[in-house]
């Protein structure tokens, strides 16, 4: 085989949702990005159908949320264990719901955005080797039968549960198998379910039925007594039996176009960063499908990492900023493992005592508003916050809601500019500085910063200057800060002017 070498800023391995969002962000920031995807064509192994509120906010900050919502089904509640109903309609978000849409739609929007921004996406590119030094990363691949050596400043493994990048780094992936022999099938139905998402669980197993939106449905089913090897197409009559047992009926399942079997693990890599190589999404953490948290956690990993990585490539950040990817996202991944693990264990409860406990917990939670609200914030991602320095302003590290802003456009001849939203301002991929007062001290950073004022000058931010990170979290805030204090904060977060 002939060999050639190419050079780029960042190599992203994996063209799933996590890798595509990351690549789009980096390309939009002006970096040279190459995505390597082993699959020559899209796989039908779509397990993700839920896009939660926090992920929709991140997609909104990239101008993609409204288009995705138009092709999906918003649900104002989630039902767990046949009984517990988690109400999402009171979430403090523009998206007080979970969007039901197949993963490939999310991937397509992220793919098109990444390509439009200038990212190079190569399919059929298999990573075979990886080594790094003080200046960069060398990735060996086989592409169209040819050995290729690619060089980059940084590399990110977003290549899933069976990550080649993680294996080449020699990183452990401790954990355990949660549930084996989960059956998947794309089917037609003779009778349409009453709800867009139909879930059922009992002592024998569980079923999950969700529409693609084009007349086809995906069913995910598990029976305690049935066992098939991973990748084995299960018989339709077995799936129908499980559906009848756990859902009450099989809705006339027929016309299978695809089916398979998989097992679900619960694992997390101890370190998301190894020198100039980082891991994101399922390459860093994997868990049960309960709660629909997997893809969402990966998207949020990518949004947290992208602006930090761009700053590092541009020489505007030290290693300390890249290290915050680990300190911020690893605890989130651990919490997701706990949440999804608890849900799947309760769903698969076998003993009568555990099933009784499950019913009791569901009944209690349904009647305790605080429990339901906390559950909604946890599952939706709205409640995620990052560590803040001691004595920092209370807003620091918190997700910033979609503030109404003004001052983002020049005044119109017939009056002041109409208020705009924070997540529209974040579409520039920059920090946003919100202040009621004119902040000329920020002028030297004008190319890296969007400045605005709260639409309500007498609201909660009337005396506060707030610096918002590109991922929508508060980086710094102060009440009536002096010029020196503001300049110090901008230098810390945006680099020298």
Image: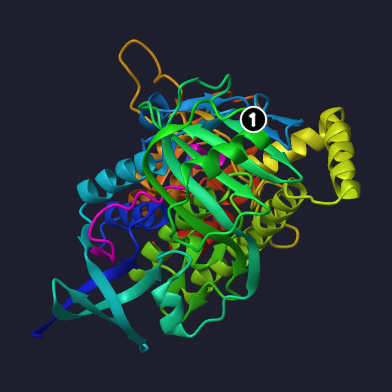
Quarter of the picture holding the N terminus: bottom left
Q: What residue lies at 50% left-to-right and 20% top-to-bottom? A: 192
User: In the image, residue 36 lies at what x, y percent?
Assistant: 27, 66
Q: Is residue 35 magenta?
A: yes
What residue does disc 1 label?
Answer: 92
Is residue 461 visible in this depiction of the protein? no
58 vs 1, left or right, is: right
**Label 1 secondary element:** loop
User: In the image, residue 27 lies at what x, y percent?
Assistant: 27, 56
Residues 407 and 469: in front is 469
Q: Which residues are magenta?
A: 32-56
Quarter of the picture holding the C terminus: bottom left
| Label 1: few (<14), some (14–19) or many (≥20) C-alpha neighbours in 10 Å | few
Q: Is residue 23 magenta?
A: no
Furthest residue toward left: 2
Instruction: Say above or below: 293 vs 97.
Output: below
Residues 7 and 417: in front is 7
Residues 17 and 100: in front is 100
User: In the image, residue 242 lies at what x, y percent?
Assistant: 61, 41
204 vs 419, left or right, is: right
Image colouring: rainbow
User: In the image, residue 344 lies at what x, y percent?
Assistant: 70, 51
Instruction: Say above or below: 142 vs 241.
Output: below
Instruction: Say above or below: 238 vs 490.
Output: above
């Amino acid at each position: 085989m002939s060999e050639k070498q190419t050079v780029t800023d960042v190599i992203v391995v994996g063209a799933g949702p996590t890798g595509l969002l990351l690549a789009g962000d980096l390309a939009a920031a002006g970096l040279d990005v190459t995505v390597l995807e082993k699959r020559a064509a899209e796989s039908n192994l779509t397990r993700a159908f839920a896009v939660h509120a926090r992920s929709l906010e991140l997609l909104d900050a990239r101008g993609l949320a409204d288009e995705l919502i138009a092709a999906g089904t918003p649900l104002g509640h989630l039902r767990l264990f046949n009984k517990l109903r988690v109400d999402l309609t009171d979430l403090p978000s523009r998206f007080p719901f979970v969007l039901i849409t197949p993963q490939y739609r999310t991937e397509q929007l992220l793919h098109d955005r990444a390509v439009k921004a200038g990212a190079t996406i190569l399919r059929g590119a298999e990573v075979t080797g990886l080594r790094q030094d003080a200046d960069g990363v060398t990735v060996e691949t086989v592409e169209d039968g040819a050995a290729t050596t690619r060089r980059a400043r940084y590399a990110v493994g977003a290549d899933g549960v069976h990550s080649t990048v993680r294996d080449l780094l020699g990183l452990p992936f401790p954990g355990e198998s949660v549930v084996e022999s989960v059956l998947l099938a794309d089917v037609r139905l003779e009778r349409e379910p009453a709800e867009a998402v139909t879930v059922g669980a009992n002592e024998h197993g569980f079923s999950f039925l969700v529409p693609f939106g084009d007349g086809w449905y995906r069913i995910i089913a598990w029976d305690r007594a049935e066992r098939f090897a991973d990748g084995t197409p299960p018989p339709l009559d077995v799936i129908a039996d499980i559906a009848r047992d756990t859902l009450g009926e099989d809705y006339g399942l027929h016309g299978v176009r695809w089916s398979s079997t998989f097992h679900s693990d619960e694992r997390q890599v101890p370190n998301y960063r190894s020198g100039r190589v980082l891991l994101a999404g399922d390459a860093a953490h994997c868990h049960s499908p309960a709660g629909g948290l997997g893809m969402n956690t990966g998207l949020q990993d990518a949004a947290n990492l992208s602006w930090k990585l761009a700053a590092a490539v541009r020489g505007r950040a030290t290693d300390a900023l890249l290290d915050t990817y680990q300190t911020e996202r690893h605890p989130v991944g651990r919490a997701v493992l706990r949440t999804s693990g608890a849900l799947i264990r309760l769903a698969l409860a076998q003993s009568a005592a555990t099933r009784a406990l499950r019913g009791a917990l569901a009944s209690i939670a349904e009647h305790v508003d605080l429990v339901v609200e906390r559950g909604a914030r946890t599952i939706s991602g709205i409640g995620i916050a990052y560590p803040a320095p001691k004595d920092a302003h209370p807003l620091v590290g918190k997700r910033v809601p979609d503030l109404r802003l003004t001052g983002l456009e020049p005044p119109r001849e017939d009056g002041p500019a109409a208020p705009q939203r924070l997540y529209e301002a974040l579409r520039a991929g920059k920090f946003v500085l919100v202040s009621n007062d004119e902040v000329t001290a920020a002028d030297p950073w004008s190319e890296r910063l969007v400045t605005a004022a709260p639409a309500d000058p007498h609201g909660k931010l009337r005396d506060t200057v707030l610096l918002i990170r590109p991922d929508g979290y508060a980086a710094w805030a102060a009440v009536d800060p002096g010029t020196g204090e503001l300049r110090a904060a901008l230098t810390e977060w945006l680099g020298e002017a």
